[in-house]
Amino acid sequence: MTARGDRILGIGLFVLAIVYGWTAQQWPEPFGAAEGIGPETFPTLLAVVLALSSGYLIVRPDPDAQWPRGRTAVEILLSIAILVVYSLLLEPLGFVIATTLAVGTLCWLMGARPVPAFLTGLIGAVVVFFLFNNLLALSLPAGLLGMV
């Protein structure tokens, strides 16, 4: 990737940040919860960070960047595919199961042994689920675990 490639990527990510941030603002406010932190808060923060990062990429691109090749390119494409599948399975499977599978698979692809990789995913998913549902009062999808 050249400096021009970085700028094109930065423009694409900037457009994505705008669409993502605008979409987050369209989410309905939960019933009886007119508070400062709502379901749009964290996606909006992510959109702002993405917009700032893409702005930096546009203004100060790396002149010597190269496209990844071979195994690295395959790993990046697999990671993107895993994240797409994760977004599709998040609602039906629930946050804990989908996150455990996604994080475990990504850790395993990065070289971790399977049991520690999926255990890391499970612990992370349970901690984040507890924090969002109990401390921040933002519900994450329970999915299959909601039936238990």
Image (cartoon, rainbow, N blue to C red):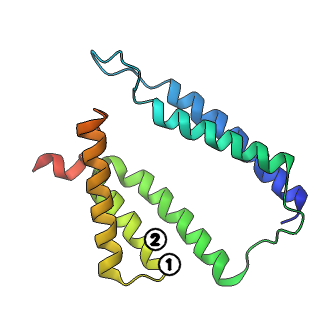
Residue at the extreme left: 148
The quarter of the displayed image where residue 104 is located: bottom left
Q: Residue 34: x and y, percent?
A: 35, 15
Answer with left or right where residue 88 lies relative to residue 139. right
User: Which residue is at a point 55% across and 41% down the rendered structure image?
Assistant: 46
At 54% from the left and 36% from the top, the residue drawn is: 45
Q: Image point 71% across, 39% down: which residue?
A: 15
Q: Which residue is mark 2?
A: 106
Badge 1 amino acid: Met
The N terminus lies in quadrant: bottom right
Position of 70 with respect to 57 (left or right) is left
* Whether residue 71 is visible: yes
Q: Pointer 2 and pointer 1: residues touching (CB < 8 Å)?
A: yes
The crowding category of the residue bearing disc 1, from other C-alpha atoms within 10 Å (few below 14, some 14 to 19, many at least 20), is few
Could you say where residue 44 lies in the image, as x and y percent from the top left? 54, 33
Q: CA distance from mark 2 to mark 1?
A: 6 Å
| SS of the residue under disc 2 | helix
> Front-most of 47 and 37?
37
Q: Quadrant of residue 22?
A: top right
Which residue is more in the foreground, 68 or 55? 55
Specify few, some or many for label 2: CA neighbours under 10 Å numbering under 14, 14-19, or 20 or more: many
Q: In the rendered image of this protein, does residue 23 appear above or below residue 82?
A: above
Q: Which residue is mark 1?
A: 110
Does residue 140 appear anywhere in the picture?
no
Question: Which mark is on residue 85?
Answer: none
